[in-house]
Amino acid sequence: MLDGGALFGVIPKSLWAEKYPANEKNLCNLSMRCMLIIAEDRKILIDAGIGSKQDDKFFRYYYLNGKATLKGSLGKAGVAFDGITDVVLTHLHFDHCGGGVEYNEDNVPVPAFKNARYWVSRQQWEWALNPNQREKSSFLQENFVPVKTNGQLEFIDKNFELVPGVELRIFNGHTDGQIIPFVRYNNKTLVFTGDLIPTSAHIPLSWICAYDTKPLAAFNEKKEFLEEALKNNYTLFFEHDINVECCNLMMTEKGIRVGKCFTLNEFLSY
Ligand SMILES: [Zn+2]
């Protein structure tokens, strides 16, 4: 859970609470949805959740809830950790990459996916190793340094096609070098919106997280992205929206807004 004020920045609570309710402590409940893409001989995981390495004191602030785990969810899909060939980390904030590294029997942090290459943007990697004061507490070195130590790190420097139909594009408003994956499926495009648009409530342009390091860049990137998405009828997939997995967009007199909401399974079946 996260404080609703931090989640919606300058937007007054009277507006955001209608779209994304908070509890009595002003906390909004979020998901940490990852995505598995199976493409020919590759099994690609997008983001890895918060993981379980941190101590109780750390987790006390985030009120983890629900029973889903990465192991459980991948297991249901019939995929073992060792079967993952690629892990794309949109960025290195702990709620996106923590599950990518775990402690081994000797209490040493090691990559949880030992046969995978881990894809990170070079800008984000450098940012995470030498963090600015504002983002420092979001970059926990044990979440990503072991990936390099174990020789599993791959950089992308610019927009990049990981496999045919999976394009990784770079955005800088939330944090430098955030990767946003665009996935082609059945002649449709599904966009894993990461922290570019964390929930369906963040679609209006000025609804920007207080966490974003460059709010004006975030605003412009979102505007450009939403115009492209509306024009090409993209489906948005939300990592953090606990209620809405996917939606498409529509134009209204106030600007681009949520169109239809549906589940990922519904997207896959039509
Ligand atoms: Zn983030």
Image (cartoon, rainbow, N blue to C red):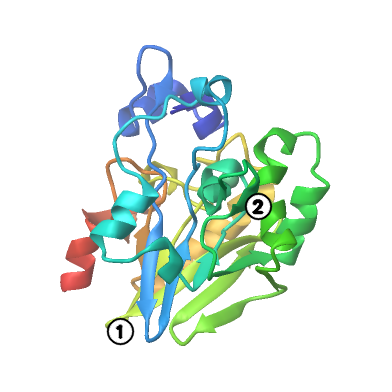
Q: Quadrant of the N terminus?
A: top left
Numbered disc total: 2
Amino acid type at image mark 1: Asn
Ligand 1 under 8 Å from disc 1 Cβ: no
Closer-to-camera residue (215/110): 110
The residue lying toward the viewer, choosing from 268 and 9, is: 268
Q: Callout 1: 10 Å neighbours few (<14), some, many (20+)?
A: few
Quarter of the render that holds ligand 1: top right
Q: Is residue 258 visible?
A: yes
Q: Which residue is mark 2?
A: 173
Q: Look at the numbered disc 1 and give the secondary structure of its residue.
A: loop
Up the image or down, 268 lies above or below 246; here it is below
Q: Quadrant of residue 262?
A: bottom left
Residue at label 1? 187
**Label 2: element kind:** loop
Q: Residue at x 70, y 33 (%)?
A: 137
Q: Residue furthest top?
A: 24
